[in-house]
Amino acid sequence: MQIHHHPLQASRGAFVRPLVMGLSSVFAVGAWAQDEPSPYYIGVTQGFTHDTNIYGSSANQISDTYSSTGLRAGLDQTIGRQRLYANANVRYNKYRNESVLDNTSYGVAAGWDWATIEQLSGNVSATANQSLANLDSTPGLTQSSAREKNTLKTDQLSTSVTWGGAGALSLQGAYAHSRVDYSAVAYAGLKSSADSASASVFYRVGPQLKLGTALRFVRTESPNAVPLSATNTDTSNTANIRNLDLTADWRPTAQTGFDSRLSWTRQTNSHQDLSDLDFSGLTGRLAVRYAATGKTTLNASLSRDVGTNAAFYNNPNTTTSSGQPTSDLTRNSQTTDTFALGAHYAATAKIGVDLGASYRRAKVVYDDSAAAADVNDNIRSLSLGAEYQVARSWQLGCKLSRSLRRVTGTTSYAYSDGSIGCTAQLTLR
């Protein structure tokens, strides 16, 4: 196999260094405002997790326990009409038996929300994340039989400008550049970089309803999208996605909210071997939030998206348990359908319980003589977590999760995975 060095690796330093410099600048600017409570925080974390399938694989279903020791720091400062924020965390993850998986994970985010005295506002933000790749968040027939460490890195720069202020009519333009990189050679086909841009018009019908329409474009470059062979001398693919969006943000009561997007979507791929991934049709998302009582909050979402790393651009408001934006990634998926349910219960002022369930189905197109060309890659997940605010600075949390993967037409990629972990966190402000 011929291995191509992806330009992402060579340029990663050029991407991360300005982000770190910007993070330092944000902390320095925050020092100007001393009249309010400290906007800074710094903390340490220590966690232990037992995972029944640490490689997320049907070939290597090995269980192990690992320790995560971390540092975290952040800033959230409002200065006049401006808001500066930054947060960073780094963890060293040490495995008891599978030392090959020992790794350092991190998450860095920084941003600036700005506004003028007129009707202009906007934001600039950047994120950089590193962790072990997890098939739970990567639907598609991608699985290595090797017991090796596969590190996933995701970076994103984004900006938006809005005109309209508190008026009924507003206009918005947005742009984002993202990159995805995997360390394992077997996952070279998932490496990509993408640019997305949108132009939106919003109209506020009343205090409870906001309607919008947008033109949205995503262009994804994958240098190693198809295997190198005698017939494939060009392994790269460019996917272009064009969307016409209709959106609605409806808040009928203080306890209930609906966010929806219905899109006419067209996706085309430049490489002839990936033409089966082309798509024309409807996509969208519906999210519902309901505060059943003062202690109980329920939420549900249903979505259909297309394209490599589709949810990276279509669901930017979802976050992981650590507060980082999710990067739901896909491979060889024409469409990905997701249904998720969640509930939060504040048992007391210091104790909270979270329950979550999700089902994700990716329609996959791939080349494999032992199976059908079109299959469904199904992942079901269930989680239960609890947090206890021991004191103002101390927090304890535990989480139990279970995942099940099934692929129609083949058993080669099926697996189950369960984990249980607890973390203690100390934060100083």
Image: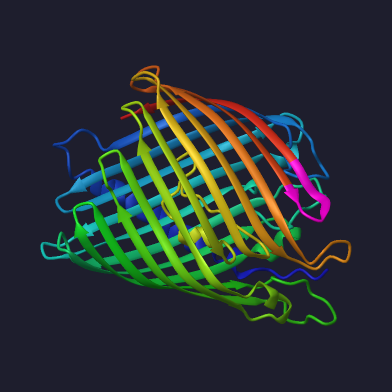
Spot occupied by residue 394 in the image (x, y as percentages of width and height): 40, 21
Q: Residue at x 20, y 53 (%)?
A: 82
Residue at figure coordinates x 33%, y 28% from the top left:
293
- Frontmost residue, 315 versus 338: 338
Q: How many marks?
A: 0
Q: Is residue 3 above or below residue 53?
A: below
Check if residue 315 falls in the magenta segment: no
Residue that lies at the very extreme toward the right in this rendered image: 370
Q: How is the image coloured?
A: rainbow
Looking at the image, the residue that sits furthest to the left is 117
159 sits to left or right of 91: left
Across and down, in percent, residue 69 comes to 55, 31
Q: Closer to the camera, 229 or 352?
A: 352
Q: Quadrant of residue 166?
A: bottom left
Using the image as rendered, state which of residue 354 and residue 132 is in the foreground: 354
Q: Quadrant of the C terminus?
A: top left
Magenta span dominant secondary structure: strand
Name the residue nearer the viewer: 230 or 337: 337
In percent of width and height, residue 21 lies at: 38, 55
Q: Could you tell whether 252 is left or right of 230 in the image?
A: left
- Residue range highlighted in magenta: 406-415
Which quadrant does the N terminus fall into? bottom right
Q: Is residue 113 above or below residue 280?
A: above
Q: Is residue 211 left or right of residue 192?
A: left
Q: Position of residue 288 (x, y in %)?
A: 40, 46
Displayed quadrant of residue 401: top right
- Tell me if residue 397 comes above or below residue 259 in the rendering: above
407 in the magenta segment: yes
Can residue 397 be seen from the camera position used here? yes
Residue 12 in view, yes or no? no
